[in-house]
Image: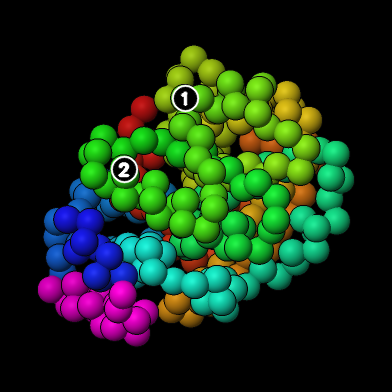
């Protein structure tokens, strides 16, 4: 099965986008993939929008999702030049000028194309780049995603081993990439914040992780400029890390909601 994805990745992005259009023309993702969860999330977050407005976001979301899946597969066969061309870092100097005696934690969200964002960090910076990930239940797809994420030298830390990694291996100059917008696993260690018009739990462990590691904390704001082209802008977060993170993430979602992962069951607990 891996051979199929490898062959698929050999196609140009132009051809992959034609395939994405074909998928959307037959409504495959819209009909088959977490339709109920997506509608439920959109209706509760945008409870003042009309049905027509919700339908438009829904349609645009699945159009983006099919692009996202194929863009991620393309990472199996893409070079650094293409990564730099497709993902433009607006202010990379903010990372290059950081205190090299401290590690750095870069926070972002499941917005735009986070797989390309991680690849871009690995391509553009010489430091050790780590990413926290949650293992998938399907062994094949878990191994496929791990292979994709390691393609440009990235190092992966299982979510349940993050604390041990911070204590023993996270050193000065290292960069840790964290997507912090998913459902926290430990409900006994959470904080409730108004996020996207809903009371939403976030892990307190994120702030503890940042403080205990004495790390510099950055937020990576990703924007989709056009099909296959993104920008990333870094800003520092100095205090109230979880609240600032949720605020910054909320802002980009409200600006262009179709690029967030609405099919994730964020409010299941």
Drawn side of residue 135 relative to residue 236, left or right: left
Q: Which mark is residue 160?
A: 1
Residue 162: x and y in percent read 55, 28
Disc 2 crowd, CA 10 A, few/some/many (<14, 14-19, 20+): few
Q: Which residue corresponds to mark 2?
A: 142
Residue under the point 56% across and 76% down? 81
Q: Secondary structure at mark 2?
A: helix
- Of 191 and 73, nearer the camera is 73
- Of 10 and 108, nearer the camera is 10
Foreground tag (2 vs 1)? 2
In this view, 90 is above or below 267: below
Drawn side of residue 67 relative to residue 116, left or right: left
Residue under the point 73% across and 34% down? 171
In this view, 23 is above or below 47: below
Residue 54: x and y in percent read 32, 63
Q: Is residue 25 highlighted in magenta? A: yes
Residue 90: x and y in percent read 71, 70
> Would you identify the image quadrant in which residue 16 lies?
bottom left
Residue under the point 27% across and 47% down? 141
Quarter of the N terminus within the rendering: bottom left
In this view, 57 is above or below 17: above
Disc 1 crowd, CA 10 A, few/some/many (<14, 14-19, 20+): few
In the rendered structure, which segment of residues is drawn in magenta?
Answer: 10-26
Drawn side of residue 158 relative to residue 204, left or right: left
In this view, 239 is above or below 38: above
Q: Secondary structure at mark 1?
A: helix
- Of 242 and 219, nearer the camera is 219
Quarter of the C terminus within the rendering: top left
């Amino acid at each position: 099965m891996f051979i199929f994805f490898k062959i698929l990745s050999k196609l140009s992005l132009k051809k992959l986008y034609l395939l994405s259009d074909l998928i959307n023309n037959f409504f495959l993702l819209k009909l088959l993939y977490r339709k109920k969860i997506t509608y439920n999330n959109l209706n509760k977050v945008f409870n003042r929008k009309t049905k027509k407005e919700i339908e438009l976001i829904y349609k645009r979301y699945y159009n983006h999702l099919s692009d996202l899946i194929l863009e991620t597969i393309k990472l199996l066969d893409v070079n650094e030049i293409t990564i730099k061309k497709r993902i433009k870092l607006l202010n990379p100097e903010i990372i290059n000028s950081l205190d090299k005696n401290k590690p750095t934690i870069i926070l972002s969200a499941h917005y735009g194309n986070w797989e390309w964002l991680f690849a871009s960090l690995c391509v553009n910076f010489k430091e050790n780049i780590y990413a926290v990930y949650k293992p998938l239940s399907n062994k094949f797809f878990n191994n496929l995603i791990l292979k994709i994420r390691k393609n440009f030298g990235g190092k992966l830390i299982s979510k349940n081993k993050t604390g041990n990694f911070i204590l023993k291996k996270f050193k000065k100059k290292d960069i840790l990439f964290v997507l912090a917008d998913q459902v926290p696993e430990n409900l006994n260690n959470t904080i409730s914040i108004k996020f996207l018009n809903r009371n939403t739990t976030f892990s307190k462990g994120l702030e503890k992780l940042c403080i205990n590691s004495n790390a510099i904390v950055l937020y990576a704001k990703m924007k989709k400029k056009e099909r296959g082209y993104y920008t990333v802008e870094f800003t520092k977060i100095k205090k109230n890390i979880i609240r600032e993170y949720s605020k910054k993430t909320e802002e980009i979602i409200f600006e262009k909601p179709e690029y967030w992962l609405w099919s994730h069951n964020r409010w299941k607990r």
